[in-house]
Amino acid sequence: MSSVSKRYSDIHSRIEAALHRAGRPPGSVGVIGVTKYVTKERAKEAVEAGITHLGENRPDGLLEKEEALASSVVWHYIGQLQSRKVKEVAGVMDMLHALDRHSLAKELEKRLPDGDTLDCFVQVNVSGEASKSGLAPEEVEDFIRSLGSYEKLRIRGLMTMAPAVQNPEDARPFFRELRKIRDDVKSLNLSHAPCTELSMGMSNDFEVAVEEGAAWVRLGSSLVGPT
Ligand SMILES: *Cc1c(COP(=O)(O)O)cnc(C)c1O
């Protein structure tokens, strides 16, 4: 397993090249190092390599690594979040990429510290695969409108996972579709939902996601390992 900093520099170049191809400004994508497969030591190596945004998909993983690492890390919760687990992570995560139902919004509103606002991405199941969570595209607008009553939630954007495809090019229509839904929601000008950003792109498809407008890519295996 090569060092995280070497991988990070390769990935950084590939992201910048994709931004250039798409006519987007340099440096306009945030990299979230997904540490769910690796030890806290390896996560520490990622932070030392300059990766300040880390992502976890289980409450236990988030809590374990948050305790072990510097407080300068910005923590992204990227997985399914059970309502009964919200109280464990509410004050720890900085952004949530998997807001997909009212019961979760309600529990977050109840458990977030008073005065806090949580930046959320609404997860959309663009491909419609039964194995994936998230709202159907046609449900997104009504769902986001209805979140206006939750004072502690701010809808920063939309998140999706593309299907696992051999050729990353085949993921493009799903990213493009998410961008279109984002444009529609953004044009509503809702004060609780600026909805400007897209969280999309993983190890095998991030360059295509960047070309299609990703603000955040979530990289596990290609960046921190294990492979
Ligand atoms: C695991 C995971 C990732 C990272 O996957 P890689 O293919 O290893 O980069 C990204 N997003 C979510 C939601 C994940 O669960």
Image (spheres, grey):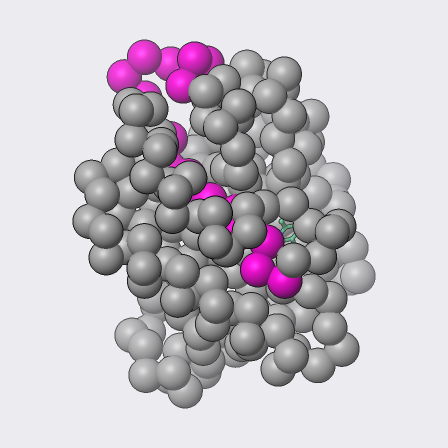
- 190 is higher (above) or lower (below) than 148: below
- 207 is higher (above) or lower (below) than 132: below
Question: Does residue 191 appear left or right of residue 219 in this picture?
Answer: left
In front of the other: 26 or 120: 120
- 150 is higher (above) or lower (below) than 165: above
* Start-end of magenta stretch: 109-127
Q: At x 74% / y 51%, what residue is drawn? A: 130
Question: Where's residue 113, x and y in %?
Answer: 38, 14
Placement of the C terminus among the 4 image quadrants: bottom right
Q: At x 43% / y 33%, what residue is drawn? A: 94
Q: At x 39% / y 42%, what residue is drawn? A: 142
Q: Residue furthest bottom?
A: 21
Residue 134 visible? The answer is yes
Question: Does residue 221 appear left or right of residue 18 in this picture?
Answer: right
Q: Residue 126 lies in magenta, yes or no?
A: yes
Question: Where's residue 139, x and y in %?
Answer: 48, 47
Q: Residue 2 lies in magenta, yes or no?
A: no
Residue 217 visible? The answer is no
Placement of the N terminus among the 4 image quadrants: bottom right
In front of the other: 156 or 191: 191
Question: Where's residue 74, x and y in %?
Answer: 45, 39
- 157 is higher (above) or lower (below) than 144: below
